[in-house]
């Protein structure tokens, strides 16, 4: 019988070691913990300057703002903060040493991403509750759909982080290599403006971006009332990007520093 793809014990041990490193970095931890509350404060300040909107209109505006904030948290924590972690572990030969032990490739990658994933989920919960209260927005109509969207986003962004790290030379350059996906998501995936609000063919193209399906599901989970066809299309788009990312990671992920030539091969199975 084949061994399971993920061993819970090894995964938890890897996650604890990554969490320990995160806790020791007090600057990064403080920013991560305070970001949802800071985002709520900024969003509320922005909405307070909007005149002529009240009742249902203000509630809808608050909901759109909170869902956009959720997408921003997922990208910042689940992607932009995870790429430097993969790069640092690679350059410090941590990934190479782990690979010589019993841990499987998927366990190593998932264990590295586990603290960021847990932190992202916690921040989404804080932002959802505090944001809904501060922005006079109603609570999610379809919480299970919202939870599924967040889970799908975390898996997709963890894979994207591992892939981005493969062509990121060092930790300092991670801010540059993560910028394209961040900008594409912020401008085209509907963080604060649905893609169908964009003109013509541009909207069609933006609906196919990696995080567009996730954001459609996030909005549908919060507001409810989405068409079945739209949900199916968003779900298939997200699943397709997850599969593409997994294939790319298996093919191009680097386990050793870039100056090494022996670590350019695919992940072992």
Image: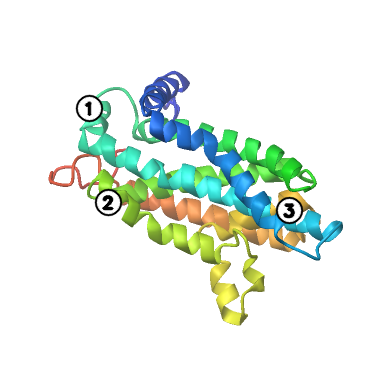
Q: Distance between the residues labelled 2 and 1?
A: 24 Å
Horizontal side, residue 209 vs residue 198: left or right: left
Identity of the residue drawn at 26% across and 23% down: 101
Residue 30 vs 76, above or below: the answer is: above
Q: Which residue is depicted at the point 50% across and 43% down?
A: 155
Image point (60%, 62%), residue name: 190
Q: Is mark 3 on a helix, strand or loop?
A: helix
Image quadrant assignment for residue 55: bottom right
Q: Which of marks 3 and 1 is in front?
A: 3
Q: Which of marks 2 and 1 is in front?
A: 2
Picture coordinates of residue 245 (x, y %)?
42, 52
Q: Earlier in the sequence, mark 3 or mark 2?
A: 3
| Label 1 Cα crowd, 10 Å radius (few <14 / some 14-19 / many 20+) | few
Element marked by disc 1: helix
Residue located 42% across and 27% down the image: 2
Label 3, on which residue?
62
Considering the image in quadrants, where does the N terminus appear?
Answer: top left
């Amino acid at each position: 019988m084949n061994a399971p793809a993920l061993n819970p014990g090894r995964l938890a041990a890897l996650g604890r070691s990554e969490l320990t490193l995160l806790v020791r970095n007090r600057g990064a931890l403080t920013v991560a913990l305070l970001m949802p509350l800071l985002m709520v404060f900024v969003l509320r300040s922005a909405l307070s300057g909007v005149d002529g909107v009240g009742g249902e209109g203000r509630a809808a505006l608050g909901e759109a703002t909170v869902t956009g904030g959720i997408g921003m948290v997922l990208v910042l924590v689940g992607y932009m903060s995870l790429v430097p972690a993969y790069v640092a572990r690679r350059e410090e030969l941590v990934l190479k040493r782990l690979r010589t032990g019993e841990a499987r490739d998927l366990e190593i990658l998932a264990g590295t991403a586990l603290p960021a994933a847990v932190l992202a989920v916690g921040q989404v919960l804080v932002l959802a509750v505090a944001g809904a209260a501060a922005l006079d927005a109603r609570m999610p109509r379809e919480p299970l759909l919202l939870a599924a969207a967040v889970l799908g986003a975390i898996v997709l962004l963890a894979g994207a982080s591992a892939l981005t790290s493969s062509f990121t030379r060092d930790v300092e350059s991670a801010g540059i290599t993560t910028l394209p996906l961040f900008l594409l998501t912020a401008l085209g995936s509907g963080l604060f403006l649905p893609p169908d609000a964009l003109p013509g063919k541009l909207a069609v193209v933006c609906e196919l971006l990696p995080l567009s399906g996730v954001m459609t599901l996030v909005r549908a989970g919060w507001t409810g009332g989405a068409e079945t066809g739209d949900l199916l299309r968003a779900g298939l788009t997200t699943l397709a990007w997850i599969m593409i990312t997994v294939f790319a990671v298996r093919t191009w992920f680097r386990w050793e520093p870039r100056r090494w030539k022996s670590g350019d091969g695919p992940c072992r199975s």
